[in-house]
Image (spheres, rainbow, N blue to C red):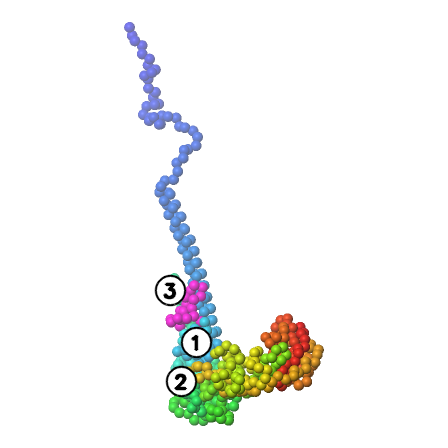
Amino acid sequence: MRTITNLSSRRTKPADRGLSRAQAEPATTGPRGEAGFTIVEVLVAAVVLIVGLLGVLTMLQGATVATVTSSERVGATNVARELTEKARALDYDDLAPATVVAAMQARDAGAGSPWTIVRRNVTYAITASVCTFDSPADGLAAAAPANVCAPQPPGAGGDANGDDFRRVTFAVSWRSHGSAGPIAQSELIVNPSGGLGPRITNVDPLTPSVGPESSTASVMFTTSVAATLRWHADDGLSKGVVNSFTGSPPDWRVDWPLGTSGGAGEVLDGSYQIVAQAFDDRAIAGEAKLATITINRRRAYAPASLAGGHDTRVDDWVDLSWGLNSERDIAGYRVYWAGSDAIVDNEDDVLVCPATAGAMLANSTSSCSDSSPNSPGAMTYYVVALDRDSTGAIREGDPRQVAIDAGSSRPAAPAGPLTATLADGELTLSWGASPGAIFYRIYRDGTAIGDRFDRTADSATTWSGEPGGDHAYSITAVDAAYNESDAIGPVS
Protein backbone atom coordinates (compact mmCIF):
# COMPACT_ATOMS: atom_id res chain seq x y z
CA MET A 1 0.00 0.00 0.00
CA ARG A 2 1.57 3.33 -0.98
CA THR A 3 2.00 5.98 1.60
CA ILE A 4 1.10 9.43 0.49
CA THR A 5 3.33 12.21 2.00
CA ASN A 6 2.35 15.94 2.23
CA LEU A 7 4.84 17.42 -0.14
CA SER A 8 3.66 20.92 0.43
CA SER A 9 5.39 21.04 3.88
CA ARG A 10 8.73 19.89 2.57
CA ARG A 11 8.85 21.84 -0.65
CA THR A 12 11.25 24.86 -0.68
CA LYS A 13 10.27 28.03 -2.47
CA PRO A 14 12.68 28.84 -5.24
CA ALA A 15 12.70 32.60 -4.29
CA ASP A 16 13.91 31.90 -0.72
CA ARG A 17 16.99 30.04 -1.68
CA GLY A 18 20.39 31.79 -0.97
CA LEU A 19 18.96 34.77 1.13
CA SER A 20 19.79 35.67 4.74
CA ARG A 21 17.16 36.09 7.31
CA ALA A 22 17.42 39.82 7.34
CA GLN A 23 17.24 39.91 3.55
CA ALA A 24 14.36 37.65 3.56
CA GLU A 25 12.44 39.80 6.10
CA PRO A 26 10.33 42.49 4.62
CA ALA A 27 11.62 46.16 5.09
CA THR A 28 10.01 48.23 7.80
CA THR A 29 8.42 51.53 7.03
CA GLY A 30 8.55 54.91 9.07
CA PRO A 31 11.36 57.32 10.41
CA ARG A 32 14.97 56.21 10.96
CA GLY A 33 16.12 55.56 14.66
CA GLU A 34 18.48 57.95 16.69
CA ALA A 35 22.08 57.55 15.50
CA GLY A 36 24.02 60.71 17.40
CA PHE A 37 27.67 62.07 16.88
CA THR A 38 30.73 60.02 17.06
CA ILE A 39 33.45 60.85 19.65
CA VAL A 40 35.73 62.15 16.91
CA GLU A 41 33.14 64.70 15.85
CA VAL A 42 32.76 65.94 19.45
CA LEU A 43 36.53 66.34 19.96
CA VAL A 44 36.94 68.30 16.74
CA ALA A 45 34.12 70.69 17.70
CA ALA A 46 35.61 71.25 21.20
CA VAL A 47 39.03 72.08 19.76
CA VAL A 48 37.51 74.64 17.39
CA LEU A 49 35.56 76.28 20.25
CA ILE A 50 38.59 76.46 22.59
CA VAL A 51 40.77 78.02 19.90
CA GLY A 52 38.13 80.69 19.30
CA LEU A 53 37.75 81.48 23.03
CA LEU A 54 41.52 81.74 23.49
CA GLY A 55 41.67 84.30 20.69
CA VAL A 56 38.93 86.39 22.31
CA LEU A 57 40.59 86.23 25.74
CA THR A 58 43.96 87.22 24.30
CA MET A 59 42.35 90.20 22.60
CA LEU A 60 40.63 91.29 25.86
CA GLN A 61 43.85 90.93 27.85
CA GLY A 62 45.72 93.01 25.29
CA ALA A 63 43.09 95.74 25.46
CA THR A 64 43.26 95.79 29.29
CA VAL A 65 47.05 96.03 29.28
CA ALA A 66 46.92 98.83 26.72
CA THR A 67 44.40 100.73 28.87
CA VAL A 68 46.50 100.36 32.05
CA THR A 69 49.69 101.34 30.23
CA SER A 70 48.01 104.39 28.75
CA SER A 71 46.69 105.41 32.20
CA GLU A 72 50.16 105.02 33.71
CA ARG A 73 51.70 107.11 30.95
CA VAL A 74 49.09 109.84 31.45
CA GLY A 75 49.92 109.78 35.17
CA ALA A 76 53.64 110.10 34.41
CA THR A 77 52.96 113.05 32.12
CA ASN A 78 50.93 114.74 34.85
CA VAL A 79 53.71 114.12 37.39
CA ALA A 80 56.29 115.65 35.05
CA ARG A 81 54.06 118.67 34.45
CA GLU A 82 53.47 119.07 38.19
CA LEU A 83 57.20 119.00 38.90
CA THR A 84 58.02 121.64 36.30
CA GLU A 85 55.34 123.93 37.71
CA LYS A 86 56.73 123.50 41.23
CA ALA A 87 60.24 124.16 39.94
CA ARG A 88 59.12 127.59 38.74
CA ALA A 89 58.24 128.50 42.33
CA LEU A 90 61.67 127.63 43.72
CA ASP A 91 64.30 130.18 44.60
CA TYR A 92 66.59 130.49 41.60
CA ASP A 93 69.61 129.47 43.69
CA ASP A 94 67.86 126.20 44.58
CA LEU A 95 67.86 125.26 40.90
CA ALA A 96 71.22 123.53 41.15
CA PRO A 97 72.16 119.85 40.84
CA ALA A 98 73.04 119.57 44.53
CA THR A 99 69.92 121.29 45.90
CA VAL A 100 67.01 120.93 43.48
CA VAL A 101 65.82 117.52 44.75
CA ALA A 102 65.73 118.59 48.42
CA ALA A 103 64.02 121.86 47.48
CA MET A 104 61.36 120.03 45.47
CA GLN A 105 60.74 117.46 48.20
CA ALA A 106 60.35 120.31 50.70
CA ARG A 107 57.41 121.46 48.57
CA ASP A 108 55.58 118.15 49.02
CA ALA A 109 56.85 116.70 45.72
CA GLY A 110 57.55 113.13 46.76
CA ALA A 111 60.32 111.89 49.02
CA GLY A 112 63.13 109.41 49.45
CA SER A 113 66.40 108.53 47.82
CA PRO A 114 65.99 107.43 45.11
CA TRP A 115 63.26 110.02 44.65
CA THR A 116 59.78 108.56 44.15
CA ILE A 117 56.22 109.84 43.84
CA VAL A 118 53.13 107.62 44.16
CA ARG A 119 50.03 108.41 42.10
CA ARG A 120 47.02 106.06 41.86
CA ASN A 121 49.00 103.17 43.31
CA VAL A 122 51.74 103.59 40.71
CA THR A 123 55.24 104.40 41.99
CA TYR A 124 57.09 106.81 39.71
CA ALA A 125 60.87 107.18 40.03
CA ILE A 126 62.13 110.73 39.41
CA THR A 127 65.51 111.84 38.18
CA ALA A 128 66.28 115.58 38.10
CA SER A 129 68.99 117.35 36.17
CA VAL A 130 69.86 121.06 35.96
CA CYS A 131 72.16 122.94 33.62
CA THR A 132 72.91 126.62 32.97
CA PHE A 133 72.34 128.39 29.68
CA ASP A 134 74.14 131.55 28.64
CA SER A 135 72.03 133.47 26.17
CA PRO A 136 73.92 135.13 23.31
CA ALA A 137 71.33 137.91 23.34
CA ASP A 138 73.37 139.92 25.88
CA GLY A 139 76.73 138.53 24.82
CA LEU A 140 78.47 135.39 25.99
CA ALA A 141 80.54 135.32 29.16
CA ALA A 142 84.31 135.29 28.89
CA ALA A 143 84.20 131.86 30.51
CA ALA A 144 81.30 129.44 30.31
CA PRO A 145 79.14 129.43 33.46
CA ALA A 146 79.36 126.51 35.84
CA ASN A 147 77.32 123.47 34.79
CA VAL A 148 76.72 124.88 31.31
CA CYS A 149 74.10 123.03 29.25
CA ALA A 150 76.28 122.66 26.14
CA PRO A 151 79.86 123.60 25.31
CA GLN A 152 80.12 127.23 24.30
CA PRO A 153 82.96 129.41 23.07
CA PRO A 154 84.16 132.35 25.18
CA GLY A 155 82.31 135.55 24.45
CA ALA A 156 84.12 138.50 22.95
CA GLY A 157 81.93 140.92 24.91
CA GLY A 158 82.71 139.29 28.24
CA ASP A 159 79.15 139.12 29.65
CA ALA A 160 79.48 139.73 33.42
CA ASN A 161 76.85 137.13 34.24
CA GLY A 162 76.52 134.13 31.96
CA ASP A 163 73.80 132.56 34.11
CA ASP A 164 70.82 133.72 32.01
CA PHE A 165 68.60 130.63 32.23
CA ARG A 166 68.58 127.26 33.93
CA ARG A 167 67.14 124.23 32.23
CA VAL A 168 65.51 121.82 34.67
CA THR A 169 64.65 118.35 33.40
CA PHE A 170 62.60 115.75 35.23
CA ALA A 171 62.73 112.17 33.93
CA VAL A 172 59.81 110.05 35.16
CA SER A 173 60.03 106.27 34.91
CA TRP A 174 57.92 103.44 36.22
CA ARG A 175 57.47 99.67 35.91
CA SER A 176 54.58 98.51 33.76
CA HIS A 177 54.18 94.74 33.37
CA GLY A 178 57.89 94.14 33.50
CA SER A 179 58.96 96.94 31.12
CA ALA A 180 60.19 100.46 31.96
CA GLY A 181 58.33 103.45 30.60
CA PRO A 182 60.30 106.74 30.78
CA ILE A 183 58.94 110.26 30.18
CA ALA A 184 61.00 113.45 30.42
CA GLN A 185 59.92 117.07 30.56
CA SER A 186 62.14 120.17 30.65
CA GLU A 187 61.55 123.76 31.69
CA LEU A 188 63.72 126.79 30.93
CA ILE A 189 63.60 129.17 33.92
CA VAL A 190 64.76 132.75 33.57
CA ASN A 191 67.20 134.22 36.07
CA PRO A 192 65.00 136.62 38.13
CA SER A 193 67.72 139.27 38.01
CA GLY A 194 67.41 139.18 34.25
CA GLY A 195 70.73 137.47 33.86
CA LEU A 196 72.19 140.96 33.63
CA GLY A 197 73.60 141.98 37.00
CA PRO A 198 76.20 140.00 38.97
CA ARG A 199 74.92 137.34 41.33
CA ILE A 200 75.67 136.76 45.01
CA THR A 201 76.59 133.10 45.21
CA ASN A 202 77.27 132.74 48.95
CA VAL A 203 76.44 134.56 52.20
CA ASP A 204 78.58 133.99 55.29
CA PRO A 205 77.66 135.90 58.50
CA LEU A 206 81.05 136.25 60.18
CA THR A 207 79.39 137.43 63.42
CA PRO A 208 75.89 135.90 63.35
CA SER A 209 75.53 136.64 67.10
CA VAL A 210 76.92 139.92 68.47
CA GLY A 211 77.79 139.84 72.18
CA PRO A 212 78.52 142.51 74.82
CA GLU A 213 82.08 143.24 73.71
CA SER A 214 81.32 143.76 70.02
CA SER A 215 80.60 147.02 68.26
CA THR A 216 80.54 145.68 64.68
CA ALA A 217 78.61 142.99 62.83
CA SER A 218 80.32 141.52 59.75
CA VAL A 219 79.05 139.51 56.76
CA MET A 220 80.96 138.16 53.74
CA PHE A 221 79.13 138.13 50.40
CA THR A 222 80.66 136.11 47.54
CA THR A 223 79.71 137.25 44.05
CA SER A 224 80.33 136.65 40.38
CA VAL A 225 82.21 139.43 38.56
CA ALA A 226 81.01 142.73 40.11
CA ALA A 227 82.15 146.34 40.44
CA THR A 228 80.53 147.28 43.78
CA LEU A 229 78.35 145.84 46.53
CA ARG A 230 75.64 147.93 48.15
CA TRP A 231 73.99 146.97 51.44
CA HIS A 232 71.49 148.19 54.00
CA ALA A 233 70.19 146.93 57.34
CA ASP A 234 66.51 146.76 58.21
CA ASP A 235 66.93 149.19 61.11
CA GLY A 236 66.02 151.86 58.57
CA LEU A 237 69.27 153.81 59.07
CA SER A 238 72.37 151.73 58.38
CA LYS A 239 73.62 151.35 54.81
CA GLY A 240 76.83 151.48 52.79
CA VAL A 241 78.79 150.71 49.62
CA VAL A 242 81.76 148.31 49.39
CA ASN A 243 84.14 149.09 46.54
CA SER A 244 86.85 146.46 47.02
CA PHE A 245 86.96 142.69 47.36
CA THR A 246 89.40 139.89 48.01
CA GLY A 247 89.92 136.47 46.45
CA SER A 248 88.51 134.78 43.40
CA PRO A 249 85.55 134.54 43.17
CA PRO A 250 85.20 137.98 44.76
CA ASP A 251 84.49 138.15 48.52
CA TRP A 252 82.96 141.43 49.70
CA ARG A 253 83.14 142.15 53.42
CA VAL A 254 80.34 144.23 54.97
CA ASP A 255 81.15 145.71 58.40
CA TRP A 256 78.07 147.16 60.09
CA PRO A 257 78.98 149.60 62.90
CA LEU A 258 76.59 149.10 65.82
CA GLY A 259 77.75 151.93 68.08
CA THR A 260 78.68 151.56 71.72
CA SER A 261 76.30 149.57 73.88
CA GLY A 262 74.47 152.07 76.05
CA GLY A 263 75.74 154.99 73.99
CA ALA A 264 73.97 157.45 71.74
CA GLY A 265 73.02 156.10 68.33
CA GLU A 266 73.55 152.45 69.25
CA VAL A 267 71.78 149.67 67.40
CA LEU A 268 69.48 148.09 69.97
CA ASP A 269 69.37 144.38 70.73
CA GLY A 270 67.34 142.06 68.55
CA SER A 271 67.36 140.22 65.23
CA TYR A 272 68.20 142.20 62.08
CA GLN A 273 68.73 141.51 58.40
CA ILE A 274 71.48 142.89 56.19
CA VAL A 275 70.41 143.01 52.53
CA ALA A 276 73.08 143.25 49.81
CA GLN A 277 73.12 143.62 46.01
CA ALA A 278 76.07 143.38 43.64
CA PHE A 279 76.37 145.86 40.75
CA ASP A 280 78.41 145.57 37.57
CA ASP A 281 80.37 148.38 35.92
CA ARG A 282 77.18 149.45 34.12
CA ALA A 283 75.41 149.95 37.51
CA ILE A 284 73.08 147.04 36.74
CA ALA A 285 72.06 145.21 39.91
CA GLY A 286 71.85 141.50 40.47
CA GLU A 287 69.49 139.64 42.77
CA ALA A 288 69.41 140.80 46.41
CA LYS A 289 70.52 138.44 49.20
CA LEU A 290 70.19 138.79 52.96
CA ALA A 291 71.97 137.69 56.12
CA THR A 292 70.47 137.51 59.63
CA ILE A 293 72.36 139.07 62.55
CA THR A 294 71.35 138.69 66.22
CA ILE A 295 72.50 141.43 68.61
CA ASN A 296 72.44 140.74 72.36
CA ARG A 297 74.81 143.11 74.13
CA ARG A 298 72.98 144.01 77.35
CA ARG A 299 69.90 143.37 79.44
CA ALA A 300 66.71 145.19 78.46
CA TYR A 301 66.47 148.92 78.97
CA ALA A 302 63.80 150.36 81.26
CA PRO A 303 60.44 150.83 79.54
CA ALA A 304 60.02 154.26 77.97
CA SER A 305 57.48 155.51 80.53
CA LEU A 306 55.37 154.46 83.52
CA ALA A 307 52.34 156.17 85.01
CA GLY A 308 49.53 155.16 87.33
CA GLY A 309 47.31 155.99 90.25
CA HIS A 310 44.50 154.87 92.56
CA ASP A 311 41.24 154.03 90.81
CA THR A 312 38.35 154.38 93.26
CA ARG A 313 35.37 153.98 90.89
CA VAL A 314 34.23 150.61 92.26
CA ASP A 315 36.89 149.73 94.80
CA ASP A 316 40.40 150.96 95.46
CA TRP A 317 42.85 149.47 93.00
CA VAL A 318 46.00 150.79 91.32
CA ASP A 319 46.06 151.17 87.54
CA LEU A 320 49.40 151.35 85.74
CA SER A 321 50.47 151.80 82.11
CA TRP A 322 53.86 152.06 80.42
CA GLY A 323 55.50 152.56 77.06
CA LEU A 324 56.74 149.46 75.25
CA ASN A 325 60.46 148.94 74.74
CA SER A 326 62.13 149.53 71.38
CA GLU A 327 64.42 146.47 71.53
CA ARG A 328 63.45 143.63 69.21
CA ASP A 329 64.22 140.84 71.70
CA ILE A 330 61.76 141.73 74.49
CA ALA A 331 60.08 138.57 75.80
CA GLY A 332 57.60 140.20 78.22
CA TYR A 333 57.10 142.45 81.25
CA ARG A 334 56.70 142.23 85.03
CA VAL A 335 55.29 144.82 87.44
CA TYR A 336 56.26 144.98 91.12
CA TRP A 337 55.09 146.86 94.21
CA ALA A 338 58.32 148.16 95.78
CA GLY A 339 57.19 147.19 99.27
CA SER A 340 56.62 149.27 102.37
CA ASP A 341 60.12 150.76 102.16
CA ALA A 342 59.45 152.02 98.63
CA ILE A 343 62.94 150.85 97.59
CA VAL A 344 63.13 149.27 94.16
CA ASP A 345 64.58 145.78 93.73
CA ASN A 346 65.07 144.55 97.28
CA GLU A 347 63.75 141.67 99.36
CA ASP A 348 60.27 142.97 100.22
CA ASP A 349 59.18 143.65 96.59
CA VAL A 350 55.95 141.95 95.54
CA LEU A 351 55.13 140.79 91.99
CA VAL A 352 51.65 142.11 91.13
CA CYS A 353 51.41 141.61 87.34
CA PRO A 354 51.24 138.76 86.68
CA ALA A 355 50.57 137.42 90.15
CA THR A 356 52.10 133.98 89.38
CA ALA A 357 55.75 133.70 90.34
CA GLY A 358 58.05 133.21 87.36
CA ALA A 359 55.41 134.23 84.82
CA MET A 360 55.44 137.32 82.62
CA LEU A 361 53.04 139.55 80.73
CA ALA A 362 53.09 139.35 76.94
CA ASN A 363 55.58 141.62 75.19
CA SER A 364 52.67 143.58 73.68
CA THR A 365 51.05 144.31 77.07
CA SER A 366 51.39 147.89 78.31
CA SER A 367 49.06 148.07 81.34
CA CYS A 368 48.06 146.21 84.49
CA SER A 369 45.96 146.68 87.62
CA ASP A 370 46.76 145.81 91.22
CA SER A 371 43.32 144.89 92.51
CA SER A 372 44.55 144.54 96.12
CA PRO A 373 46.95 147.41 96.80
CA ASN A 374 48.68 147.52 100.17
CA SER A 375 47.10 150.86 101.13
CA PRO A 376 45.12 153.76 99.65
CA GLY A 377 48.04 156.06 100.39
CA ALA A 378 51.28 156.81 98.53
CA MET A 379 53.01 153.77 97.04
CA THR A 380 55.87 152.95 94.66
CA TYR A 381 55.66 150.55 91.74
CA TYR A 382 58.12 149.61 89.02
CA VAL A 383 58.06 147.72 85.73
CA VAL A 384 60.84 145.72 84.05
CA ALA A 385 61.15 144.35 80.54
CA LEU A 386 62.49 140.81 80.10
CA ASP A 387 64.82 139.40 77.46
CA ARG A 388 67.17 136.38 77.29
CA ASP A 389 70.85 136.15 78.05
CA SER A 390 73.42 134.32 75.91
CA THR A 391 72.37 130.97 77.40
CA GLY A 392 68.69 131.55 76.63
CA ALA A 393 67.68 132.16 80.26
CA ILE A 394 65.12 134.87 81.02
CA ARG A 395 66.60 137.98 82.63
CA GLU A 396 65.00 141.16 83.95
CA GLY A 397 66.04 144.51 82.59
CA ASP A 398 66.44 147.95 84.10
CA PRO A 399 63.47 149.06 86.25
CA ARG A 400 61.21 152.05 85.60
CA GLN A 401 59.49 153.25 88.77
CA VAL A 402 56.60 155.57 89.57
CA ALA A 403 55.39 157.04 92.86
CA ILE A 404 51.64 156.73 93.30
CA ASP A 405 49.98 159.51 95.30
CA ALA A 406 47.09 158.98 97.67
CA GLY A 407 43.69 158.68 96.02
CA SER A 408 42.17 161.90 94.69
CA SER A 409 38.68 162.95 93.71
CA ARG A 410 37.21 161.20 90.70
CA PRO A 411 36.68 162.98 87.36
CA ALA A 412 33.26 163.76 85.91
CA ALA A 413 31.69 161.16 83.68
CA PRO A 414 31.93 161.68 79.92
CA ALA A 415 29.19 163.86 78.54
CA GLY A 416 26.40 161.94 76.85
CA PRO A 417 24.86 160.65 74.87
CA LEU A 418 26.95 157.60 73.99
CA THR A 419 26.16 156.59 70.41
CA ALA A 420 27.15 153.62 68.29
CA THR A 421 27.17 153.48 64.49
CA LEU A 422 28.05 150.55 62.25
CA ALA A 423 29.39 151.12 58.73
CA ASP A 424 31.26 148.71 56.44
CA GLY A 425 31.72 146.24 59.29
CA GLU A 426 33.31 148.80 61.64
CA LEU A 427 31.77 150.00 64.89
CA THR A 428 32.26 153.64 65.95
CA LEU A 429 31.45 154.87 69.45
CA SER A 430 31.07 158.60 70.13
CA TRP A 431 30.54 160.59 73.35
CA GLY A 432 31.13 164.00 74.89
CA ALA A 433 34.32 165.11 76.67
CA SER A 434 35.04 164.97 80.41
CA PRO A 435 37.10 167.90 81.79
CA GLY A 436 40.60 166.80 82.77
CA ALA A 437 40.41 163.36 81.10
CA ILE A 438 43.68 162.13 79.60
CA PHE A 439 42.07 159.07 78.02
CA TYR A 440 38.85 157.05 78.06
CA ARG A 441 38.27 153.37 78.79
CA ILE A 442 35.97 151.21 76.69
CA TYR A 443 34.12 148.44 78.55
CA ARG A 444 32.25 145.61 76.84
CA ASP A 445 29.38 143.59 78.32
CA GLY A 446 29.83 145.02 81.82
CA THR A 447 31.83 147.60 83.80
CA ALA A 448 33.96 145.40 86.08
CA ILE A 449 37.75 145.37 85.78
CA GLY A 450 37.55 142.15 83.78
CA ASP A 451 35.25 143.82 81.24
CA ARG A 452 37.85 146.35 80.12
CA PHE A 453 38.12 146.00 76.37
CA ASP A 454 40.25 148.89 75.08
CA ARG A 455 41.21 152.52 75.66
CA THR A 456 41.76 155.60 73.60
CA ALA A 457 45.34 156.69 73.00
CA ASP A 458 44.58 160.23 74.18
CA SER A 459 41.59 162.43 75.03
CA ALA A 460 39.80 161.73 71.72
CA THR A 461 36.07 161.17 72.20
CA THR A 462 35.58 158.52 69.53
CA TRP A 463 36.65 154.90 69.24
CA SER A 464 36.44 152.54 66.25
CA GLY A 465 36.91 148.81 65.91
CA GLU A 466 35.32 145.58 64.76
CA PRO A 467 32.18 144.74 66.74
CA GLY A 468 32.82 140.97 66.81
CA GLY A 469 29.14 140.16 67.41
CA ASP A 470 26.37 141.65 69.54
CA HIS A 471 27.84 143.46 72.57
CA ALA A 472 27.00 146.28 74.96
CA TYR A 473 29.61 149.06 75.36
CA SER A 474 30.19 151.58 78.17
CA ILE A 475 32.70 154.45 78.51
CA THR A 476 34.56 155.97 81.50
CA ALA A 477 36.96 158.93 81.75
CA VAL A 478 40.44 158.67 83.37
CA ASP A 479 42.33 161.69 84.69
CA ALA A 480 46.07 162.31 85.21
CA ALA A 481 45.95 160.61 88.65
CA TYR A 482 44.46 157.51 86.95
CA ASN A 483 41.20 157.87 88.86
CA GLU A 484 38.17 156.83 86.90
CA SER A 485 34.72 158.36 86.46
CA ASP A 486 31.32 156.73 86.48
CA ALA A 487 30.43 154.88 83.27
CA ILE A 488 27.98 156.08 80.67
CA GLY A 489 26.05 153.59 78.57
CA PRO A 490 25.65 150.84 77.78
CA VAL A 491 24.90 151.09 74.09
CA SER A 492 24.52 148.06 71.83
Counting residues from the N terminus, which is met first, the one under dot 3 or under dot 1? 1
Residue 210 lies in quadrant: bottom left
Q: Quadrant of the N terminus?
A: top left
Q: Tell me which amino acid carries mark 1.
A: Ala
Is 113 covered by the magenta stretch? yes
From which residue to which does the magenta span run? 109-127
Name the mark on residue 103.
1
Q: What residue did someone put label 2 on?
A: 144
Q: What residue did someone put label 3 on?
A: 179
Q: Tell me which amino acid carries mark 2.
A: Ala
Query: Measured from the top left, where is residue 6 in percent x and y?
Result: 33, 13
The local secondary structure at tag 3 comes to strand
Q: Quadrant of the C terminus?
A: bottom right
Q: CA distance from mark 2 to mark 1?
A: 26 Å
The local secondary structure at tag 1 comes to helix
Q: CA distance from mark 2 to mark 3?
A: 39 Å
